[in-house]
Amino acid sequence: MHPARCALGGFTRGLVLGLGLACFVPFGVASAQAKDVLVFAAASLKNALDEASAAWMRESGKRVVASYAASNALAKQIEAGAPADLFFSADLDWMVYASSKGLIKPESRISLLGNSLVIIAPKGSTVQVELKAGLDLASVLGSNRLAMGHVDAVPAGKYGKAALEHLGAWAGVKDRIAQTENVRAALLLVSRGEAPLGIVYKTDAASDPNVDIVATFPEGSHPPIVYPVTLTKDSNNPDAASLLSFLRSDKAKPFFEKQGFTVLDKAGSGS
């Protein structure tokens, strides 16, 4: 396996490594066999996609192996030759990047899911945040840091930065961000009490009983959160198209909605 670079500040690197989080993305999955469908998917999809994949495996008798990480890291891995069959991104930018590099089959691409962006705190926290123009988040943080995905690369971090800029809060906290290699790492920092606040997707918050949602960002404060999925250009696994078709079907819809995703209109295909 070849480790992907992690653009973390010293403070955050210490936190993440201290929590035992692996700061790499598998170049290949050792347990995957030639007949398996190998899916590279955004970390925030794990719970829903695990359940949907399990349903497809029961129905088809085939096997799915999933590699979860930040969309930027996965796109770079595919560019480097990782043998993924499907790429499921947490934003359009990294799908556009993959398309521009000729890494996908454009005709198979669809914008499948939507999500919401929230601020979380450890379970039982009494902190209050009102997300409105002029937000002074620095005073809420005190001497602590805000956990979020890397703001220049990880989709949740990019959405979070955009939302904070929109509300006028970014300048006050930009030097007090605990940046992580993916959104689930930010979730874990808050879940374990290593950070008092974090910015994650609504679906991430729902997956962890040790955090509470403090506030939800207004939709207009950041670009729409869209999850596109596609077959990769080099995939020659005939089962990959079957899995993609299942993920687009009504059979898979409950698994995504259970975790808090919005299943988008299929007319969004190719967007």
Image: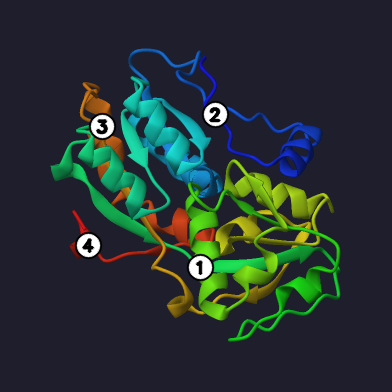
Name the residue tied to disc 3. Answer: 232
Q: Where is residue 4 in the image (x, y as percent from the top left)?
A: 52, 26
Q: In this view, does 73 lie to the left or right of 234?
A: right
Residue of label 2: 5
CA distance separating discs 3 and 2: 22 Å
Name the residue: 56% across, 59% down: 203
Dot 4: what SS? helix
> Disc 2 marks which amino acid?
Arg
Residue 96 placement, left or right of 218: left
Q: Position of residue 7 (x, y in %)?
A: 58, 38
Q: In front of the other: label 3 or label 2?
A: 2
Looking at the image, which residue sits at the far bottom? 133
Residue 162: x and y in percent read 49, 67
Marks 1 and 4, how far apart in space?
A: 18 Å
For label 1, the residue is 116
Between tags 4 and 2, which lies in front? 2
Disc number for residue 268: 4
Q: Distance between the residues labelled 1 and 2?
A: 28 Å
Examine the image and state in which quarter residue 122 appears: bottom right
Q: How crowded is mark 3: few (under 14 residues within 10 Å), some or many (20 or more)?
A: many
Decide: is 206 above or below 228.
below
Image marks 4 and 3: residues in contact by CB distance under 8 Å? no
Q: How far apart are marks 1 and 3 (CA)?
A: 27 Å
**Residue in the picture at 53% in, 49% down:** 44
**To which quarter of the image does residue 164 belong?**
bottom right
